[in-house]
Amino acid sequence: MQDIKHITPDFAVSPQIAPVQLADLKAAGFTTVICNRPDHEDAGQPSFAEIKAAALVAGLEAFHIPVTPGQATRVDVVAFDTAVATAQGKVLAYCRTGARAQSLFAAIQG
């Protein structure tokens, strides 16, 4: 898949993904996806429910930790840390551009 930026061997970020991409993510070795976008942030954006349903079919775990740009709270960071720390393999976190996901990852690195 294009637009995936590997931060570490087991953690990557990307812009918005589509439900049809979840099987490819699984084939690429990912086990977990984390959505950092609130639903309805942009017109035409797939809902987290759609992403989660496709993730489950593909055999992936999916977490929704929606963050408004520039407004991540300590609760958001802790939830993100828990999702990453408990993943059983490679994690892909996404948002509109990947920046929020990357910022949350930087926050948990301390």
Image (cartoon, rainbow, N blue to C red):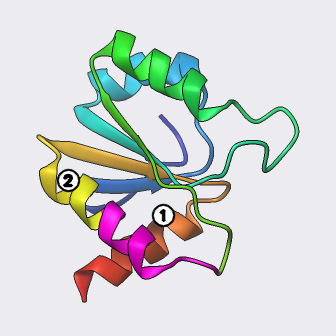
**Residue at 62%, 52% in the rendered image:** 37
Looking at the image, is 54 positioned above or below residue 78? above
- Quarter holding residue 6: bottom left
Which of the two discs, 1 and 2, labels the residue nearer the N terminus?
A: 2
Looking at the image, is 56 positioned above or below residue 87? above
Which residue is nearer to you in this view: 5 or 84? 84
Type of amino acid at the residue the image marks with label 2: Asp
The residue at the far bottom in this view is 110
Task: Tell me the quadrant of the picture where the C terminus can be found.
Answer: bottom left
Residue identified by numbered label 2: 10
* Side of 103 relative to 89 (left or right): right
Cα distance between the residues tagged 1 and 2: 14 Å
**Residue at 88%, 39% in the rendered image:** 43
- Quarter holding residue 44: top right
Q: What secondary structure is found at the residue carrying circle 2?
A: loop
**Residue at 79%, 43% in the rendered image:** 40
* Side of 68 relative to 72 (left or right): right
Residue identified by numbered label 1: 101
Q: What secondary structure is found at the residue carrying circle 1?
A: helix
Q: Main secondary structure of the magenta part?
A: helix
Type of amino acid at the residue the image marks with label 1: Ala
State the image coordinates of residue 75 (x, y, percent, origin top left). Answer: 40, 73
State the image coordinates of residue 105 (x, y, percent, origin top left). Answer: 36, 71
* Side of 107 relative to 8 (left or right): right
Q: Which residues are magenta?
A: 71-80
Q: Nearer the viewer, mark 1 or mark 2?
A: 1
Mark 1: few, some, or many residues within 10 Å (few <14, many ≥20)?
many
* Side of 92 relative to 109 (left or right): right
